Image: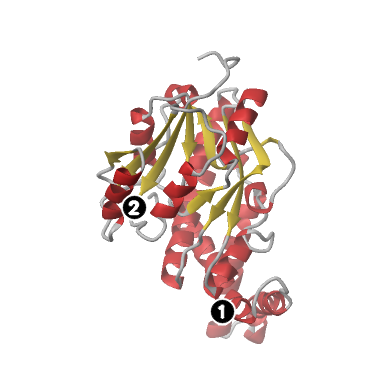
């Protein structure tokens, strides 16, 4: 495909595993997209071996909408994405997460940006939205520089070339040329693919007008697992591409190490109460942050006292583990 050609036909792809609660909303947001080309749109669900009612929801959606289903036996995200890409017949691949909903003009605007910039991939802001106080606290952390460190696709920024973007709207020809997503990268596959796109001489472009609503994990166990796994895979990427790593990735593991060493000092009797300085400083900062956060309800502020340390420490512990243990 010549990059000067105007892109029109679109394939939406969703890797799906245990998404009974959110899948229908995600698919509905696709069919609520505005100004799409008539007859040049398809939706492909890559279904993993879910243990909840996800597959029943998918079959019901198939009877309601023109949805195509492909089976993803491993249930792994990059494998599902690649299966859906291979099944797609259109020029543009729009990645959708089952935990997300696209803003109404998302796809039309993304196609316009692809055509104007000749980029290989465009994307925008992950707008985290919580329903319960727990989710609201997590959503606030996603959009805060003190939560996840302030990446543009979390907090916004100016349009322009970017290292990576949230989800992504791709030229299919580029994905085929680069053999799609790395199926060894169970997490962090977006960043790794965007690195290969940039290394091939193509453009990854961020535009904050491209907004996707994302629903965070709904309980502490799921949140802790998500962030530990994400930290571990980020460490693998960092180990392989150290020169490309952002300094903010090292803040959580350094905090974990400092607090752990301080507690070891206290327990061993070496250094006495001085060993509590890292932990007490961190907890004081979290308390001030939670109490002073006027954007959240009282219950959500209390939840911040739990969610933010969980996100920081699980990510940091995962990162440290991932540096030394190949996953």
| 34 horizontally vs 282: left or right | left
Residue 214 image point, x, y percent: 53, 55
Residue 244 occupies quadrant: top right
Residue 111 occupies quadrant: top right
Crowding near the residue tagged with mark 1, few <14, some 14–19, many ≥20 C-alpha atoms within 10 Å: many
Whichever of callouts 2 and 1 sits on the residue coming sooner in the sequence is: 2
The residue singled out by tag 1 in the image is 263
| 291 horizontally vs 9: left or right | right
Residue 299 image point, x, y percent: 59, 80
**Element under disc 1:** helix
Image vertical order of residue 37 relative to residue 157, above or below: above
Does any portion of residue 254 appear in the rendered image?
Answer: no
* Residue drawn at point x = 51 percent, y = 62 percent: 216
Crowding near the residue tagged with mark 2, few <14, some 14–19, many ≥20 C-alpha atoms within 10 Å: many
**Mark 2 touches mark 1? (CB < 8 Å):** no
* Residue drawn at point x = 43 percent, y = 25 percent: 90
Does any portion of residue 140 appear in the rendered image?
Answer: yes
Image vertical order of residue 129 relative to residue 309, above or below: above
**Element under disc 2:** loop
* Residue drawn at point x = 28 percent, y = 59 percent: 53
| 251 horizontally vs 131: left or right | right
Q: Indicate which label's residue lies in the foreground, 2 or 1.
A: 2
Distance from label 2 to label 1 (Cα)? 39 Å
Query: Which one is nearer the viewer's eye here, 35 or 131?
Result: 35
The residue singled out by tag 2 in the image is 17
Residue 96 image point, x, y percent: 47, 44
* Residue drawn at point x = 45 percent, y = 21 percent: 177
Query: Which one is nearer the viewer's eye here, 107 or 301?
Result: 107
Image vertical order of residue 111 relative to residue 249, above or below: above
| 198 horizontally vs 57: left or right | right
Residue 2 occupies quadrant: top right
Q: How many marks?
A: 2
């Amino acid at each position: 495909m010549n990059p000067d050609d105007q892109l029109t036909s679109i394939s939406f792809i969703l890797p799906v595993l245990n998404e009974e609660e959110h899948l229908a909303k995600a698919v509905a947001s696709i069919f609520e997209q505005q100004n799409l080309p008539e007859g040049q749109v398809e939706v492909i669900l890559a279904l993993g071996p879910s243990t909840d009612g996800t597959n029943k929801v998918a079959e019901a959606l198939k009877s309601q909408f023109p949805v195509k289903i492909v089976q993803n036996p491993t249930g792994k995200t990059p494998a599902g994405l690649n299966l859906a890409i291979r099944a797609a017949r259109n020029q543009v691949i729009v990645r959708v997460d089952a935990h997300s909903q696209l803003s109404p003009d998302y796809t039309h605007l993304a196609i316009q940006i692809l055509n104007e910039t000749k980029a290989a991939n465009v994307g925008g802001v992950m707008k985290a939205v919580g329903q319960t106080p727990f989710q609201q606290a997590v959503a606030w952390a996603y959009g805060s520089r003190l939560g996840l460190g302030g990446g543009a696709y979390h907090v916004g920024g100016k349009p322009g070339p970017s290292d990576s973007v949230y989800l992504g709207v791709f030229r299919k020809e580029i994905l085929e040329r680069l053999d799609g997503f790395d199926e060894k990268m169970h997490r962090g596959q977006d960043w790794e693919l965007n690195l290969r796109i940039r290394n091939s001489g193509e453009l990854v472009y961020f535009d904050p007008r491209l907004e996707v609503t994302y629903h965070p994990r709904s309980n502490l166990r799921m949140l802790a697992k998500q962030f530990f796994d994400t930290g571990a895979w980020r460490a693998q990427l960092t180990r392989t591409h150290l020169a490309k790593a952002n300094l903010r990735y090292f803040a959580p593991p350094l905090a974990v190490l400092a607090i752990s060493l301080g507690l070891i000092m206290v327990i061993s009797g070496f250094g006495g109460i001085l060993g509590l300085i890292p932990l007490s400083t961190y907890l004081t900062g979290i308390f001030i942050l939670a109490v002073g956060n006027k954007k959240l309800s009282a219950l959500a502020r209390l939840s911040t006292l739990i969610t933010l340390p969980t996100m920081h420490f699980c990510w940091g512990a995962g990162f440290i583990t991932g540096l030394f243990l190949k996953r």
